[in-house]
Amino acid sequence: MPTCAYCKQEGTMTREHVIPSFLYKLQKSSGKQFVGWNEVVQKMVGGEAKVKDVCSNCNNGVLSELDAYGKQVLDEAGILVHNYLGRSLVLKYDYARLLRWSLKVSFNSSRTDGAHRHLFEDFVPFILGVAESPPRKRVALLAYLASPIALDKTQEVNSAFVEAALGAKTLNPLIVRICYGYVRGDDSLVLRINILGPLVLFMPIFNPEVLLGHAAASIRRLQKLHPGAVDLYGKKRLVQLRAGASTWIDMWSDQARRVRGLQGNA
């Protein structure tokens, strides 16, 4: 009998969206099919990617509740639009719930491409809400606001994205990408990345033996790589993000660095 990836119970499995369904629905309302990047086929796809190893209790229960919370956070931040024109936003959040949702989305993606599934196993009880938050030396959560691009200064976007600008002079579209990057010279972590339109959530997942001080140094190194990235850890419930120097196109460089690094060409 198949086993649920979350609760480990055997039984009939259901289909769970990799990218939460509310993001698919918003994309479809634009009439365009460029919902996000597929790591397996290495291109933008418009289909609804799903995993088939989640029981109905988890799918319709705690995982659905986490998606509802993720939608609430993004909606309150004003991100759920086809083209985000602002250069700042206020992010209201509960750290544990936002981390649970971010881990859940990344864990779903990891099971489609075979990368890093094992890294999430220790966090599954936390995702399900039956364990305390993992320490900062195991996983951190940072938020970054990508800058828009000026449509009259680039040839790097296709016509579908230009149409999504809705007549505006700048473009910051609701492209969703669940992926991982590479931090050169730091083998203490795996950098998982959830790109949700202009909002980028970095999740450095550290090796179990990493000390707290070393993890903190790695987080600072990541912030130097992406000036403006805010560490969400702690008792804060609200942060203001200001658009960094990197555009939404530049954010693809994390994967490029990772690929070059693995090939020894970084």
Image (spheres, rainbow, N blue to C red):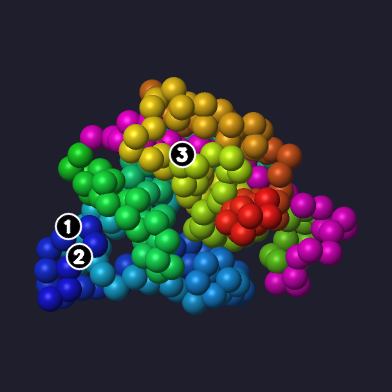
Q: Tell me the distance, in whole angstroms, between the alpha carbons under discs 3 and 1.
A: 28 Å
The residue that disc 1 covers is 7
Q: In this view, which residue lies farthest toward the front?
A: 264
Within-10-Å neighbours for mark 1: few <14, some 14–19, many 20+: some
For mark 3, what is the residue? Answer: 188
Name the residue beneath numbered marker 2.
Answer: 4
Above or below 228: residue 76 = below
The reply to whether the C-beta atoms of the residues labelled 2 and 1 are less than 8 Å apart is yes
Residue at 53% across, 69% down? 38
* Foreground label between 3 and 2: 3
Whether pointer 3 and pointer 1 mark residues with C-beta atoms closer than 8 Å, the reply is no
Sequence order check, earlier mark of 3 and 2: 2
- Eye-nearest disc, 3 or 1: 3
Residue extent of the magenta highlight:
132-160
What is the C-alpha distance between the residues marked 2 and 1? 6 Å
SS category of the residue bearing label 2? loop
Number of other residues with Cα within 10 Å of mark 2, as a class: few under 14, some 14 to 19, many 20 or more: many
| Residue 32: percent from left, percent from top | 61, 74
Q: Give the vertical position of 167 relative to 250 (above or below).
A: below
Callout 2, which amino acid? Cys
Indicate left or right for 241 with 60 as reference.
right
Q: Residue at x 29, y 57 (%)?
A: 64
Res. 222 mark: none
Q: Is residue 94 visible?
A: no
Residue 159 is left or right of residue 260, and the answer is right
Q: Secondary structure at mark 3?
A: loop
